[in-house]
Amino acid sequence: MGCAASPKSGENSDIFEKEPMALLSILCYPDPKLHKVAKPVATVDARIRAIAADMIETMYEAKGIGLAATQVDVHERLIVIDVSEERDEPLVLINPELVWTSPTTHLNEEGCLSVPGIYDGVERFDGVHVRAMDLDGHVRTIEADALLAVCIQHEMDHLMGKVFVEYLSPLKRNRIKKKMLKAQREDER
Ligand code: K1U
Ligand code: ZN
């Protein structure tokens, strides 16, 4: 059941040296590294553009609609998202900040590439406005609703070290933790 799009080695330590795009290893819950708080990106440079390109490729390969840098063991505030039908509208948000949240919320079914096979309901704002830099270092404000708004909130939680299962009851969360650890032991055999 392992986390998707993993290269052979479990580490991404060589991503800063590579030129061509590469698939990155996705951390699997309950890896403690998923709870690290990401630091702001200092400069949007070639290193950040290379990480973003690798994250987009990894997200597409894993059939996800989003991916946060935390999930690939890079602890900087960077997320990639593509909620388009054709999977050809990647969005890169660097140092994202929520600048507006709607007064209404909704229970949405969520999944997570770091918790494969688990789906459950999480209450999220129906709409959000997010200010972030793009790959040219330009600041933009994105007005999001529906799945894009849900995905932005899910990915921004990752940057704060929060995985969606932490919104569930302790009973559910412990069951999920046990299931993931069992699957990881079986994958290692
Ligand atoms: O961050 C991630 O782990 C990616 C995650 C994003 C996400 C999905 C659903 C709701 C909120 C955030 C995924 O892409 S999970 C797999 C997936 O493709 C998917 C799951 C449910 C609905 C739509 C897509
Ligand atoms: Zn996730």
Image: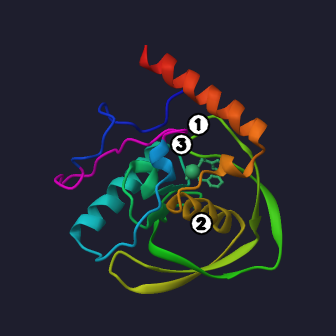
Q: Decide whether residue 140 is among the magenta residues.
A: no
Three-letter code, disc 2: Ile
Quarter of the C terminus within the rendering: top left
Residue 170, percent from left and from top: 75, 41
Q: Check disc 3 and give the amino acid type.
A: Ser
Mark 3: secondary structure? loop
Q: Which mark is residue 30?
A: none
Query: Does dot 2 land on a helix, a strand or a loop?
Result: helix
Image coordinates of residue 172 in percent, x first then y, are 76, 37
Placement of the N terminus among the 4 image quadrants? top right
Circles 1 and 3 in contact, beta carbons < 8 Å? yes
Q: How is the image coloured?
A: rainbow
Q: Residue at x 29, y 66 (%)?
A: 48
Q: Is residue 133 above or below residue 78?
A: below
CB contact under 8 Å: marks 1 and 2: no
Which type of secondary structure does the marked residue at label 1 adopt?
loop
- Give the distance between the C-alpha atoms of the residues marked 1 and 2, in whole angstroms: 19 Å
Disc 2 crowd rating (10 Å Cα; few below 14, some 14-19, many 20+) is: many
Q: CA distance from mark 2 to mark 3?
A: 16 Å
Looking at marks 1 and 2 on the same chain, the residue that comes earlier in the sequence is marked by 1
Q: Give the quadrant of residue 94.
A: bottom left
Q: Is residue 22 magenta?
A: yes
Residue range (magenta): 15-31
Q: Is mark 3 within 8 Å of ligand 2?
A: yes
Identify the residue position indicated by label 2 in the image.
152
Q: Earlier in the sequence, mark 2 or mark 3?
A: 3
Image vertical order of residue 143 relative to residue 186, above or below:
below
Quickly name the residue at label 1. 116
User: Residue drawn at (47%, 20%), measured in percent from left and top?
Assistant: 187
Residue holding disc 3: 114
Locate residue 90 relative to residue 44 in the image: left or right: right
